[in-house]
Image (cartoon, helix red, strand yellow):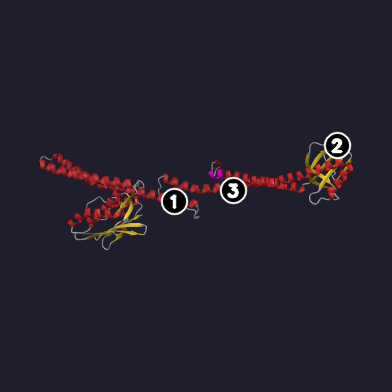
């Protein structure tokens, strides 16, 4: 896996975006923690020190230096929480009272925060403190503060967590991104290999499944189904092309022979007979091509027609249309369907399905035979079935009779072998289930329309 490919990987880029969002979230969380755990307590400490400083300055102004010293000592004695710090410096720089070991020599502002040495507990210690540096009258300088070592430690911990957490998040995120990029690229490469094999002409190529059942396996399974469908369609197209060439050879040969005889005919009556025969062949070819075009259009996409269709009425019309042909062969044509059967679809196309099934039944049922047409509701579907007691179709040939031009050894029976192909295409267009069953004897064709 080369570096350029890794850098262009969508997985890596998404990982980097996630890392940025995660790091930003951690930073925001620590910022909120800092505000709640350090900044706000510091503001509260400063407010307390300001109040103490104002109170001590007022004592000095009213009662003098000695009263201020007593107040400072009382402040230390009364402390229960944070250690109080103070330094009182005379105008000449002499220290009058202090519990600190060091402080800023020069006053640079009202507030200072840094580590001070203290002996308030009897031993020298370093403590973080917040101190207010005040200038009193007569040149005295007063520093008043409290210990904030806990806040300093908390602040250090937050910044250390921020630096280490951000660094570790970026490092682990980058490593995780590289691992995920490799894993995803490896899975995608399987799909690419199968696609390149198909592009190269090997329609049997399939995507290798990982076996985990994850999204990639589901995608691979879907692609395999698509490739199998494409392979089947290409094979079907090849068979259809061969069948078309075979089926057209005979009528075109007859048409050519009849036209040649017509050209050589000297008798007007013979010429009319030959012209009529040539016209019949031309009409037969036209019917074949129209059937092929209709099947192709049906298989080209989903139906746009979803109007309500009265299936009972269509069954009655189709039976009435084919009853004369059945009676001519002495066949009994029986219809059994309740009133009000309805589906949604293309009315003309559904009628074509019924007509083709009845035409086949009449064509292949022997004289004196019986044909039954049924319609019924089955749960959330409507079934129509056409049964006959003719020769039927062997079980191993039933899938093939749905192919174009396949005629199941029916000899010289009229037709092109396209009727059931059109029925199958129309059923698929309507999302219907088509089944060919044994009528014992004969064939039973069932079309199940969803409602």
Residue 16, by quadrant, is top right
| Rendered position, 251 above or below 337 | above
Residue 386, by quadrant, is bottom left
Q: Where is residue 144 in the image (x, y as percent from the top left)?
A: 82, 43
Question: Which class describes the residues within 10 Å of circle 1: few (<14), some (14-19), or many (20+)?
Answer: few
Image-based side of 35 in relation to 434, left or right: right
Which of pointers 2 and 1 lies earlier in the amino acid sequence? 2
Q: Are marks 2 and 1 in contact (CB under 8 Å)?
A: no
Q: Which numbered mark, 2 or 3, is in the foreground of this view?
A: 2
Question: Which class describes the residues within 10 Å of circle 3: few (<14), some (14-19), or many (20+)?
Answer: some
The C terminus is located in which quarter?
Answer: bottom left
Q: Are marks 1 and 3 in contact (CB under 8 Å)?
A: no
Q: Residue 137 carries which label?
A: 2
Task: Find disc 1 in the rendering and name its residue.
Answer: 222
Give the magenta part as a residue range: 10-14
| Rendered position, 208 above or below 62 | below
Which of pointers 1 and 3 lies earlier in the amino acid sequence? 3
Q: Residue 176 carries which label?
A: 3
Residues at marks 2 and 3, CA–CA distance in whole angstroms: 66 Å
| Element at label 3 | helix
Q: Where is residue 202 in the image (x, y as percent from the top left)?
A: 41, 47
Q: Which numbered mark, 2 or 1, is in the foreground of this view?
A: 2
Main secondary structure type of the part rendered in magenta: helix
Which of pointers 2 and 3 lies earlier in the amino acid sequence? 2
């Amino acid at each position: 896996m080369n570096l350029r490919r890794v850098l262009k990987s969508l997985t890596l880029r998404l990982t980097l975006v996630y890392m940025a969002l995660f790091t930003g979230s951690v930073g925001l969380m620590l910022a909120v923690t800092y505000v709640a755990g350090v900044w706000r307590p510091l503001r509260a400490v400063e407010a307390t020190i300001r109040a103490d400083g104002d109170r001590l300055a007022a004592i000095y102004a009213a009662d003098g230096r000695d009263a201020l010293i007593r107040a400072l000592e009382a402040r230390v004695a009364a402390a229960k929480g944070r250690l109080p710090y103070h330094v009182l410096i005379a105008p000449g720089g002499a220290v009058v009272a202090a519990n600190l070991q060091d402080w800023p020599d020069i006053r640079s502002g009202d507030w200072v925060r840094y580590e001070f040495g203290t002996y308030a507990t009897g031993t020298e210690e370093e403590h973080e403190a917040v101190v207010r540096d005040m200038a009193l009258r007569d040149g005295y300088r007063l520093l008043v503060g409290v210990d904030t070592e806990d806040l300093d430690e908390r602040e250090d911990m937050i910044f250390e967590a921020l630096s280490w957490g951000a660094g570790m998040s970026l490092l682990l995120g980058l490593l995780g991104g590289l691992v995920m990029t490799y894993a995803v690229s490896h899975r995608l490469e399987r799909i690419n290999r199968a696609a390149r094999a198909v592009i190269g002409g090997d329609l049997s190529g399939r995507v290798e499944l990982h076996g985990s059942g994850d999204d990639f396996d589901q995608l691979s399974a879907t692609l395999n189904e698509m490739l199998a469908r494409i392979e089947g369609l290409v094979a079907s197209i090849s068979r259809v092309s061969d069948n078309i060439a075979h089926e057209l050879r005979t009528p075109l040969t007859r048409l050519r022979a009849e036209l040649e005889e017509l050209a050589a005919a000297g008798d007007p009556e013979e010429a009319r007979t030959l012209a009529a025969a040539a016209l019949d062949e031309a009409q037969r070819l036209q019917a074949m091509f129209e059937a092929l075009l209709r099947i192709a259009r049906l298989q080209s996409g989903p139906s746009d027609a979803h109007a309500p269709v009265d299936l009972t009425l269509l069954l009655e019309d189709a039976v009435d249309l084919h009853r004369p042909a059945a009676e001519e062969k002495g066949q009994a044509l029986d219809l059994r369907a309740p009133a009000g059967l309805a589906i949604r679809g293309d009315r003309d196309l559904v009628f074509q399905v019924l007509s083709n099934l009845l035409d086949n039944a009449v064509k292949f049922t022997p004289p004196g035979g019986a044909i039954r047409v049924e319609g019924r509701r089955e749960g959330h579907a409507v079934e129509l079935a056409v049964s006959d007691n003719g020769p039927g179709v062997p079980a191993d040939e039933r899938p093939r009779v749905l192919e174009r031009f396949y005629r199941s050894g029916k000899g010289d029976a009229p037709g092109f072998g396209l009727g059931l192909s059109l029925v199958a295409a129309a059923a698929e267009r309507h999302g219907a289930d088509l089944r060919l069953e044994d009528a014992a004897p004969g064939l039973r064709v069932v079309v199940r329309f969803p409602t």
